[in-house]
Image (cartoon, grey):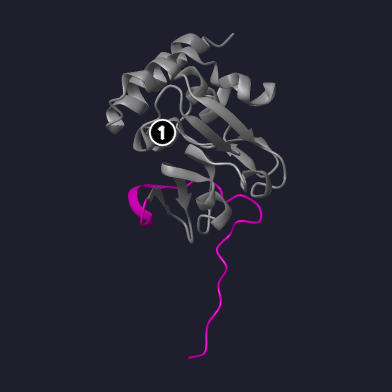
Protein backbone atom coordinates (compact mmCIF):
# COMPACT_ATOMS: atom_id res chain seq x y z
CA UNK A 1 0.00 0.00 0.00
CA UNK A 2 1.33 3.43 -0.96
CA UNK A 3 2.24 5.90 1.76
CA UNK A 4 0.52 8.93 0.25
CA UNK A 5 1.12 11.14 3.32
CA UNK A 6 4.88 10.67 2.97
CA UNK A 7 4.63 11.21 -0.79
CA UNK A 8 2.76 14.50 -0.21
CA UNK A 9 5.45 15.75 2.15
CA UNK A 10 8.17 14.67 -0.27
CA UNK A 11 6.37 16.43 -3.14
CA UNK A 12 6.39 19.74 -1.27
CA UNK A 13 9.98 19.36 -0.05
CA UNK A 14 11.51 18.11 -3.31
CA UNK A 15 9.39 19.68 -6.07
CA UNK A 16 7.64 22.75 -4.72
CA UNK A 17 9.95 24.46 -2.22
CA UNK A 18 13.12 24.12 -4.37
CA UNK A 19 11.24 25.81 -7.25
CA UNK A 20 11.21 29.11 -5.33
CA UNK A 21 7.67 28.67 -4.09
CA UNK A 22 8.00 30.50 -0.78
CA UNK A 23 4.33 30.99 0.17
CA UNK A 24 3.93 28.76 3.23
CA UNK A 25 0.15 28.79 2.76
CA UNK A 26 0.60 26.94 -0.54
CA UNK A 27 2.96 24.45 1.14
CA UNK A 28 0.44 23.86 3.93
CA UNK A 29 -2.46 23.35 1.51
CA UNK A 30 -0.47 20.96 -0.69
CA UNK A 31 0.65 18.95 2.36
CA UNK A 32 -2.96 18.69 3.57
CA UNK A 33 -4.75 17.82 0.32
CA UNK A 34 -4.84 14.25 -0.94
CA UNK A 35 -3.83 14.82 -4.57
CA UNK A 36 -4.61 11.19 -5.36
CA UNK A 37 -8.31 11.96 -4.75
CA UNK A 38 -8.33 13.99 -7.99
CA UNK A 39 -7.25 11.02 -10.11
CA UNK A 40 -8.85 7.74 -11.13
CA UNK A 41 -7.92 4.97 -8.66
CA UNK A 42 -5.73 3.25 -11.27
CA UNK A 43 -3.58 6.40 -11.52
CA UNK A 44 -3.42 7.31 -7.82
CA UNK A 45 0.17 6.10 -7.61
CA UNK A 46 1.15 8.94 -10.03
CA UNK A 47 -0.38 11.71 -7.89
CA UNK A 48 2.93 12.98 -6.50
CA UNK A 49 5.19 12.36 -9.48
CA UNK A 50 6.84 15.26 -11.27
CA UNK A 51 4.58 14.81 -14.33
CA UNK A 52 1.21 15.90 -15.65
CA UNK A 53 -1.34 13.17 -14.95
CA UNK A 54 -4.55 12.73 -16.96
CA UNK A 55 -7.66 12.59 -14.79
CA UNK A 56 -10.25 12.68 -17.61
CA UNK A 57 -10.16 12.66 -21.42
CA UNK A 58 -8.29 15.79 -22.50
CA UNK A 59 -7.69 16.95 -18.91
CA UNK A 60 -4.63 16.58 -16.69
CA UNK A 61 -3.41 17.77 -13.33
CA UNK A 62 -0.40 20.03 -13.74
CA UNK A 63 2.96 19.08 -12.28
CA UNK A 64 2.92 19.97 -8.57
CA UNK A 65 5.75 22.47 -9.10
CA UNK A 66 3.91 24.22 -11.93
CA UNK A 67 0.56 24.58 -10.17
CA UNK A 68 2.34 25.88 -7.04
CA UNK A 69 4.28 28.45 -9.10
CA UNK A 70 1.11 29.56 -10.91
CA UNK A 71 -0.71 30.03 -7.62
CA UNK A 72 2.16 31.91 -6.03
CA UNK A 73 2.32 34.24 -9.05
CA UNK A 74 -1.30 35.36 -8.58
CA UNK A 75 -0.96 35.74 -4.79
CA UNK A 76 -4.39 34.41 -3.79
CA UNK A 77 -5.72 35.97 -0.60
CA UNK A 78 -8.44 34.72 1.79
CA UNK A 79 -11.87 36.04 0.90
CA UNK A 80 -11.07 36.63 -2.78
CA UNK A 81 -13.29 35.19 -5.51
CA UNK A 82 -11.53 32.66 -7.73
CA UNK A 83 -12.36 30.79 -10.91
CA UNK A 84 -10.60 27.46 -11.48
CA UNK A 85 -10.78 26.42 -15.14
CA UNK A 86 -10.08 22.70 -15.75
CA UNK A 87 -8.18 22.96 -12.47
CA UNK A 88 -9.64 20.71 -9.76
CA UNK A 89 -6.44 20.52 -7.72
CA UNK A 90 -5.75 24.27 -7.93
CA UNK A 91 -9.37 24.84 -6.89
CA UNK A 92 -8.89 22.69 -3.79
CA UNK A 93 -5.63 24.45 -2.88
CA UNK A 94 -7.28 27.87 -3.20
CA UNK A 95 -10.31 26.72 -1.20
CA UNK A 96 -7.94 25.49 1.54
CA UNK A 97 -6.33 28.96 1.45
CA UNK A 98 -9.69 30.62 2.15
CA UNK A 99 -10.83 31.75 -1.30
CA UNK A 100 -14.39 31.42 -2.58
CA UNK A 101 -13.79 29.18 -5.60
CA UNK A 102 -16.00 28.50 -8.61
CA UNK A 103 -14.94 25.46 -10.64
CA UNK A 104 -15.40 25.35 -14.39
CA UNK A 105 -14.90 21.75 -15.51
CA UNK A 106 -17.52 21.16 -18.18
CA UNK A 107 -16.96 21.08 -21.92
CA UNK A 108 -17.64 24.81 -22.36
CA UNK A 109 -14.68 26.39 -20.62
CA UNK A 110 -15.54 29.94 -21.68
CA UNK A 111 -19.31 30.54 -21.54
CA UNK A 112 -20.08 30.56 -17.78
CA UNK A 113 -17.12 32.85 -17.01
CA UNK A 114 -18.67 35.66 -19.04
CA UNK A 115 -20.63 38.11 -16.92
CA UNK A 116 -19.00 37.25 -13.59
CA UNK A 117 -15.78 38.77 -12.32
CA UNK A 118 -13.06 37.18 -10.23
CA UNK A 119 -9.98 38.29 -8.33
CA UNK A 120 -8.07 35.17 -9.37
CA UNK A 121 -8.47 32.91 -12.42
CA UNK A 122 -6.29 29.80 -12.77
CA UNK A 123 -6.19 27.15 -15.51
CA UNK A 124 -4.26 23.85 -15.18
CA UNK A 125 -4.27 23.18 -18.93
CA UNK A 126 -2.44 25.04 -21.66
CA UNK A 127 -4.07 27.25 -24.27
CA UNK A 128 -2.74 28.82 -27.46
CA UNK A 129 -3.65 32.25 -26.10
CA UNK A 130 -5.79 33.30 -23.14
CA UNK A 131 -9.39 33.53 -24.40
CA UNK A 132 -10.98 37.00 -24.30
CA UNK A 133 -13.80 35.63 -22.07
CA UNK A 134 -11.25 34.70 -19.39
CA UNK A 135 -9.70 38.17 -19.51
CA UNK A 136 -13.19 39.70 -19.33
CA UNK A 137 -13.81 37.70 -16.14
CA UNK A 138 -11.03 39.58 -14.31
CA UNK A 139 -12.17 42.12 -11.72
CA UNK A 140 -10.14 45.29 -11.27
CA UNK A 141 -6.70 44.10 -10.04
CA UNK A 142 -7.78 40.55 -10.96
CA UNK A 143 -5.05 38.07 -11.96
CA UNK A 144 -5.20 35.24 -14.51
CA UNK A 145 -2.55 32.50 -14.43
CA UNK A 146 -2.36 30.25 -17.48
CA UNK A 147 0.16 28.49 -19.70
CA UNK A 148 0.17 29.71 -23.30
CA UNK A 149 1.62 27.04 -25.54
CA UNK A 150 2.29 27.13 -29.26
CA UNK A 151 4.87 24.36 -29.51
CA UNK A 152 6.72 21.84 -27.37
CA UNK A 153 7.21 24.27 -24.46
CA UNK A 154 4.75 26.85 -23.21
CA UNK A 155 5.09 30.01 -21.14
CA UNK A 156 3.24 30.29 -17.87
CA UNK A 157 2.05 33.85 -17.68
CA UNK A 158 0.03 36.17 -15.51
CA UNK A 159 -2.46 38.71 -16.81
CA UNK A 160 -3.39 41.62 -14.54
CA UNK A 161 -6.39 43.91 -15.01
CA UNK A 162 -5.61 47.51 -14.14
CA UNK A 163 -7.68 50.64 -14.55
CA UNK A 164 -6.13 51.31 -17.95
CA UNK A 165 -6.36 47.76 -19.37
CA UNK A 166 -4.87 44.31 -19.05
CA UNK A 167 -1.13 43.62 -18.86
CA UNK A 168 0.75 40.34 -19.27
CA UNK A 169 4.08 38.93 -18.06
CA UNK A 170 5.81 35.57 -18.51
CA UNK A 171 6.84 33.74 -15.34
CA UNK A 172 8.28 30.31 -16.27
CA UNK A 173 8.38 27.56 -18.92
CA UNK A 174 5.85 24.73 -18.61
CA UNK A 175 4.54 21.83 -20.70
CA UNK A 176 0.97 20.92 -19.66
CA UNK A 177 -1.21 19.42 -22.38
CA UNK A 178 -3.21 21.91 -24.46
CA UNK A 179 -6.92 21.82 -23.63
CA UNK A 180 -9.12 20.51 -26.44
CA UNK A 181 -10.34 23.40 -28.58
CA UNK A 182 -7.72 25.83 -27.23
CA UNK A 183 -4.77 25.14 -29.55
CA UNK A 184 -3.06 28.09 -31.21
CA UNK A 185 -4.64 29.05 -34.52
CA UNK A 186 -2.00 29.30 -37.23
CA UNK A 187 -2.42 31.08 -40.49
CA UNK A 188 -1.15 34.00 -42.47
CA UNK A 189 -2.35 37.42 -43.35
CA UNK A 190 -2.04 39.36 -46.58
CA UNK A 191 -0.95 42.91 -46.13
Q: Which residues are magenta?
A: 163-191
Relative vertical location of residue 134 with respect to residue 23 in this rendering, above or below: below
Query: Can residue 48 be seen here?
Result: no
Q: Is residue 149 magenta?
A: no
Residue at (65, 52) in percent of width and height: 180
In the image, farthest residue toward the front? 163
Q: Is residue 89 found left or right of 6 in the rendered image?
A: right
Relative vertical location of residue 63 with respect to residue 5 in this rendering, above or below: below
Relative vertical location of residue 153 with respect to residue 15 in this rendering, above or below: below
> In which quadrant of the rendered view does residue 53 lie?
top right
Percent from the top left, x then y, of residue 26? 39, 22
Could you classify mark 1 by the number of other residues whose Cα lies within 10 Å: few (under 14), some (14-19), or many (20 or more)?
Answer: many
Secondary element at image label 1: helix
Counting every numbered tag in the picture gives 1
Q: Is residue 82 found left or right of 10 in the rendered image?
A: right
Percent from the top left, x then y, of residue 108? 70, 47
Quadrant containing the N terminus in the rendered view: top right
Q: Is residue 171 magenta?
A: yes
Residue at (62, 48) in percent of width and height: 114
Percent from the top left, x then y, of residue 101? 56, 28
Residue at (52, 90) in percent of width and height: 190
Residue position for label 1: 71
96 or 181, which lies in front?
A: 96
In the image, farthest residue toward the bottom? 191
99 or 39, which lies in front?
A: 99
52 or 147, which lies in front?
A: 147
Query: Can residue 145 be seen here?
Result: yes
Percent from the top left, x then y, of residue 12? 38, 21
Q: Is residue 145 found left or right of 72 in the rendered image?
A: right
> In which quadrant of the rendered view does residue 56 lie?
top right
Amino acid sequence: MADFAAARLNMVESQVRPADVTDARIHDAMRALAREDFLPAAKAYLAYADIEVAYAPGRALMKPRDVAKLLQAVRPMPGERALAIAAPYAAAVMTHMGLAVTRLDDDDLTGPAVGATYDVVVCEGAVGRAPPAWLAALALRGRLAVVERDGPVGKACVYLRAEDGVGRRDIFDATPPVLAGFAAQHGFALE
